Amino acid sequence: MGILDVQNVNKSFGGLKALHNVNLDIEEGKIHAIIGPNGAGKSTLLNCFVGKLMPDTGTVMFDGQSLLGIKPHEINQLGVSRVFQTPEIFSELTVWENTLIPCFAKRDGSFALHALSRVSDNKDMAEKAEKMLVDVDLINKKDMLASSMSRGDKRRLEMAMCLSQNPKLLLLDEPTAGMARADTQSTIELLKNIQKKLKITMVIIEHDMGVVFSLAQKISVLAQGTVIVEDVPEKIKGHPKVKEAYLGEAQV
Amino acid sequence: MKSISNADTRTLYFVAIIAILAPFILNPFPTDSGLAQFNAGYPDLMQRFAIYGILAIGFNILFGLTGYLSFGHAAFLGVGSYSAVWMFKLLSMNIIPAIILSVIVAGLFSLLIGFISLRRSGIYFSILTLAFAQMSFALAYSVLTPLTNGETGLQITLNDPRIFAAENVSGNLPVTSLFGMEMRDTWTLNLGAWDFQFNIGYYICAIFLLIAFYLSIRIFRSPFGMMLRAVKTNQTRLNYTGINTRPYTLAAFVISGMYAGLAGGLMASMDPLAGAERMQWTASGEIVLMTILGGTGTLLGPVMGAGFIKYFENIFSKINDTVLHGWFAWMPDGLENIIVWILHLFTGKGWHLTLGIMFMLIVIFLPGGLMEGMSRIGNWWKRRKGGDENTSDATSTPAE
């Protein structure tokens, strides 16, 4: 059994069956991609992992513990971080503060009343944040307001925020959506390096086939709310079922 | 002051110096001159500057950092006042137990209201707090009359038990004090045409203001303060970062409620009575105005906003038609009457109109409040100075 074990997950919205008997087994230390045409239920599935949606039936086990019915912040404290489709960052704070907050959250838990110590007195936190910003190449922008950065930078900042918590599982919802070609390349390199160095398990939802095939070690193809194929990238490329699902939407 | 940075230490010293020298700074005009009515250096008003400063600082910890706009903060002020007066009635006229109880009671009260109101955010949160404050007002005004003495307001009387006080033989109402120092004691310094008043009560309030201000700097610079600012900008990200936002917002709410309780306790310590009108929604609105006017989320802004509004409330409202006629007596009669008629709308009882116009102008042109105005002036000054140096360089270069 892998680190994330999803069994028989069903989810309906009114009459629409968004997920139908989804089974997934995510192996520890691997990059697992979930692909599929628009409306296949990829984001719905991800939302079931992080406490945003509650599946109608089925189980989602992470590291031997059920993720169903507990709140997003509790799931994060278990070691699951998430990168959003549109970067969710603290846009009115500086890049530096953005990076510090996850470090404090990791150290102090979901609530701590450190109202009289100074942020800058926490040298260990500062070291961690600085190292993270160097890793994503944002250290020279650390005093900028997060809202004033380019979209690619925001995305890298969000990734740095997630990674600074040393998550056991990193969920990425279209991490290269809306990025320039060069940024996409550097993001792929970044993720590859992280994976090599830290052995973090990643689940990537992605539209861009180039990204998927250069990153993923295993791919699940989702269509109409159910997993139709699950295999290594080489086998997925020419798979007839996958071609059928995409119906010429992308050259697979 | 190792625990706060240099810039913050300078701000703190700045506030301390202003507070100590307030009797001089607020009294720039000679006592007998026509401008003496613009002097604000009398004990009653100076006390109010400090007390409302504390109130606004506390409100800013909630509104400025988390963005949760409480529209019921006057309830905590009122609760603090009532608690303090009860202490004067039951224990003694010493202000210390009164202030301690008012902070504790306001803290508990805000814990209750905050726990319920913080289930919602945005406008719903504001409405919930407003509803609670109005309920408290109604309770204080009528239902809880045995506790609050209804519309008359809670006052001290000669028959109160005051178990720790020496027996009162004078037949006069006792006065609030701190170990023998009476709050109303004022020492007047005559310097030529000027009278400067140094009041014990004011300096007690000023000490509390400085403590409150120092604590607010610490909170602003702490990890807790950083989390509160994160709440304001993106709660989704904060949740997915492993932070439970509810206890953070509740803690901020209770802290700011305790600040309001302290302000209420001090208010009763300066003048031992408490009325329900202190809890009314207009009083809550005034706190919001002070904070926005001064600069939401800045350290110094709320104190400035509080001073600004209290100054206008007390000084502009004193300018009545007689005063206006006195000013414009040199004009031809018809013109004088017209001018007085126009200004009449904005002064005396119409001072709210002046305040409203100023508030509109500041919100439209200086969304950051008075603090933004100051920093703009500062920048303009720097640029001008920089510009001067450049031009002087330009003129001096050919001469060389």
Image: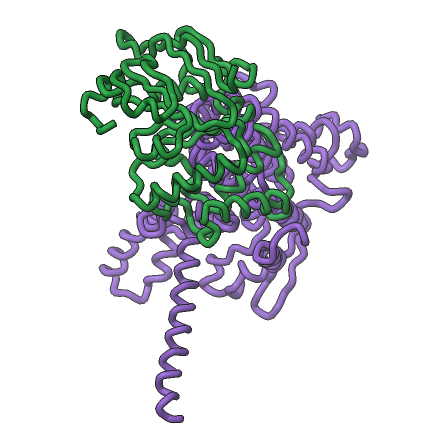
Chain colours: A green, B purple
Q: Residue at x 65, y 62 (%)?
A: B189
Measured along the vertical axis of the image, is residue B363 above or below residue B150? below
Task: Judge by depth and name the residue closer to the eye, B260 or A162.
Answer: A162
Measured along the vertical axis of the image, is residue B332 above or below residue B201? below
Q: Is residue B276 visible?
A: no
Q: Residue at x 47, y 27 (%)?
A: A30
Q: Is residue A74 visible?
A: yes
Horizontally, residue B340 falls left or right of residue B25, namely: left
Place residue A23 in its image quadrant.
Answer: top left
Task: Judge by depth and name the residue closer to the eye, B343 or A126.
Answer: A126
Quarter of the figure with the C terminus of chain A: top left
Picture coordinates of residue A143 (x, y %)?
47, 52
Task: Judge by depth and name the residue closer to the eye, B397 or A142.
Answer: A142
Task: Judge by depth and name the residue closer to the eye, B177 or A132.
Answer: A132
Horizontally, residue B308 falls left or right of residue B6, namely: left
Picture coordinates of residue B313 (x, y %)?
44, 46
**Residue at far bottom of view:** B400
Picture coordinates of residue B182 (x, y %)?
71, 45
**Residue at far right of view:** B166
Horizontally, residue A126 falls left or right of residue A56, namely: right
Q: Residue at x 59, y 29 (%)?
A: A109
Measured along the vertical axis of the image, is residue A142 above or below residue A172? below
Q: Residue at x 40, y 49 (%)?
A: B368
Q: Count of labels shown?
A: 0
Picture coordinates of residue B98 (x, y %)?
68, 33
